[in-house]
Amino acid sequence: MKLRNKINLYTSVLFIVLLFLMNASIYLLFSHLMMSNELDRAKAEVERIASDMSSAIDRIAPNQLLLAYVPVNGMIQVLNEDLTSEAKITSASETALKSRKSNFSAGEVSKIISFGNKQYVFVSYPVIWNDGRVVNLQVISSIQATDEMIKILRIVLIGVAIIAMIPVFISSRILSNLIIQPIRLMINTMKEIQKSGHFKRLKLEETSEEELVEMGETFNHMIDLLQTNFEKQEQFVSNASHELRTPLTIIENYSDLLKRRGQERPDLFEESIEAIHSEAVRMREMTEQLLLLAKTQEQWNIQMTSINVTELVSETANTFQNTYQREISVESSGIFTGYTDYQKLKQLLFIFLDNARKYSDEHITIFVSTTSNETYIQIEDRGIGIPKEDIPKIFDRFYRVDQARSRKQGGSGLGLTMAKQIAKAIGVRIELDSLENRGTKVTLFFKTKKAE
């Protein structure tokens, strides 16, 4: 069964059940109130008759006395304990009540009885007769009118329930369509994506906060992730095939050269081994960078915390200096903290320090300080610098300012691209200032503390 039909069926059945339960409750409550009212009215009437009889029984004959109080549709009698009647009078319409078997009661009795397919109120009230005996004053009164009203109410409620089924079915159909519409839209969108191969998103009402809109937003977010991953995959394949072609060609050519002349010329053997090793190392580094760039930021396991920036910079500078035997000085006017990811910031520093090492021969300086609301790290080198026209392009993938020198230094053109993505993920703003043949300054800005 389709979801639309399930929603239509379940809502209709639930509403109809609730409607019948409500109508049944109304019917039972109304009938109970009506019957209770009839009993109360009959008891009050019998008490009034008993009071009048006590004062007039010595002066008026029982039959004549009861004749004045006989119900319009009922019977009145005075019943002795031996079930004989002092007087029994019925209305013209209820003569059949004379054949009803009577019972003597020691106390007051009031109830609803059935006789001859009709409903009556029966009240028995003990009265002291003129000779001192205790007799029952019994009144039976028809409640046919009340019973008819209750039957009419039952018919009306059943009719209303049946008639209400029509708008219930219509409204449930409308409701199911409203619920299914965004789901159907998602299905059609996914079918279009499947046919065309192009990613498409749902149009949502920005002012609404309904769960269906939230589901649509989740769908769009999922499409964004799929598109991002798809584009990263395509870009990874394209970049890998483009960039790996050159080192693979170099390795293949030197391998062929070794096979042909390697044993004859030792100098050629050494050159080939060095070239193959260098290209293999560059391929490994480039592959690791490509794999990292192919991941989404959600897969980077970012952990934002408050860190001691001064201590981090000092440790990173010492490690780098010991590894590459390059002079690196750290200048800081105090101990500064920042709110970012410790490991990713360290990786970011390594990328810029590695660039400074490759493209400058003099010592490298790192400044740590703060502005009014940000902490910053500035890395300064006195190397070849970057031409002004190339600065906007240096964060593009595989872009190199000096292709020949970059190849010689072992660069893949991915370091700054990766730095840009890392900075974006950990909330770091990068500013770059460079003069050709003078040097480069890279400044990393980030929050001093977590935003409230």
Image (spheres, rainbow, N blue to C red):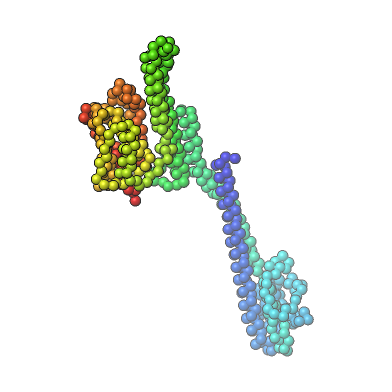
Residue 410, x across and y down, in percent:
34, 25
Tell me which residue sits at (31%, 47%) in the image.
337
Residue 45 to residue 260: above or below: below
Q: In front: 62, or 16?
A: 16
Quadrant of the rendered structure where residue 106 is?
bottom right
Residue situated in front as seen by the camera: 39 or 382: 382
Q: Is residue 211 left or right of residue 160?
A: left
Quadrant assignment for the N terminus: top right
| Residue 117 image offset from top left, x and y in percent | 72, 65
**Relative to 377, does residue 399 appear above or below in the rendering?**
above
The number of discs equals 0
Which residue appears at 56% of the width and 47% of the height? 169
Seen at 65% across and 69% down, the residue is 143
213 lies left or right of 360: right
> Is 340 situated left or right of 259 in this image?
left
Camera-side residue of 90 and 219: 219
Residue at 68%, 87% (x, y): give it: 57
When the figure is inspected, residue 182 is found, relative to residue 146, above or below; the finding is above
Residue 352 in the image: state x and y as whole percent.
Answer: 31, 34
Depth check: 283 or 27 in front? 283
Q: Is any part of residue 398 visible from this angle?
A: no
Does the image show residue 15? yes
Relative side of 439 to 113, left or right: left
Percent x, y of residue 30: 59, 64
The quarter of the picture where residue 227 lies is top left
